[in-house]
Image: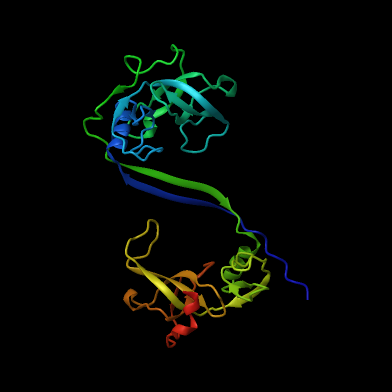
Amino acid sequence: MSPAPAPEALSAPLTVEFPFTRSLGPVQSAFLTGLRERVPLGVRTGDGRVLVPPVEYDPATAEELRELVEVAPTGTVTTWAWNPAPRPDQPLPTPFAWVLVRLDGADTALLHALDAPGPEAVRTGMRVRIRWAAERAGAITDIACFEPHGGGPHESGPGGEARPHDGEFADPVTGIVAPARLDYRHSPGRAQTRYLAALAEHKTVGERCPSCRKVYVPPRGACPTCGVATAEQVEVGPRGTVTTYCIVNIKAKNLDIEVPYVYAHIALDGADLALHARIGGIPYDQVRMGLRVEPVWTDGGRYPDHYRPTGEPDADYDAYKELL
């Protein structure tokens, strides 16, 4: 019998986003507060080098660094790359150059954007200066970008050299929120497309390895143990066993589930790999290893909303211990 035709490969936009909140040590606090006040700062190492942006430990010796210095808002491009199609939230909405700029008085280069009319206007060794943002809050974005500068050769801070700075400012910045976001288009591939298509029909399908004969759910198209391609489809479940679990006490953004609730690894009957799912229909403090569960589907849902107890006796530990 000829195999059933593969469903059309799925594809969908996907966004992964995580705003990271961090506190700042004295060096990073002074650097970002200095940007807010239009004072570019670096830090001097034990051998006299000036690092911009500053770090708290010497990358060569691991020595703690605290000697802050002020450098100039002008500098020299050390290398560059043209960006013809800026992405959302990049420094400039029009094409620009990514540049490494060694500010006058510094020995290392700072990465930022250069506002230039085209790649023909950019060159290594060109002189540039900081264009400050109109509104500044103590972040790297307080530098709106760099712009070409026709000033004299290699000016430094006042006096021609980087000069000492105590790093003291009114209302210093002590913490930042760094947004991390990745927008891309995800194509799950042959194996996962079949898996998702089966879920839409309230079935759970894995793939069996031709070598070790284990059934993996969700399938990946290859056995993670043997490294060989998998193609034989096997329907598993729908019931399964909780192998381990965790209690969630922090409410997730855009997830309409009251805390506390439980997420668990569930070994579906016939599968050799536990999948991840929410447990419902039971108080969170009654979920346990070995609990027998079954899927609950919502109207029009393409995958189970959660798993609930079946009422069967708990599975014996020896029946699922290899899947922990």
Residue 26 appears in which quarter of the rendering?
A: top left
Q: Is residue 54 left or right of residue 90?
A: left
Residue 186 appears in which quarter of the rendering?
A: bottom right
x 34%, y 47%: residue: 21
x 43%, y 88%: residue: 313
Q: Position of residue 270 (x, y in %)?
A: 57, 80
Residue 235's place in the image compared with 120, above or below, is below
Q: Position of residue 237 (x, y in %)?
A: 55, 79
Question: Which quarter of the rendering shows the N terminus?
Answer: bottom right
- Outermost left residue: 170
Q: Position of residue 315 (x, y in %)?
A: 45, 85
Of 40 and 161, nearer the camera is 161
Residue 60 appears in which quarter of the rendering?
A: top left
Of 48 and 266, nearer the camera is 48
x 60%, y 59%: residue: 188
Of 288 and 258, nearer the camera is 288
Query: In this orientation, does residue 137 appear?
Result: no
Residue 19's place in the image compared with 67, above or below, is below
- Outermost bottom residue: 313
Q: Position of residue 233 (x, y in %)?
A: 65, 73
- Outermost right residue: 1
Residue 78's place in the image compared with 193, above or below, is above
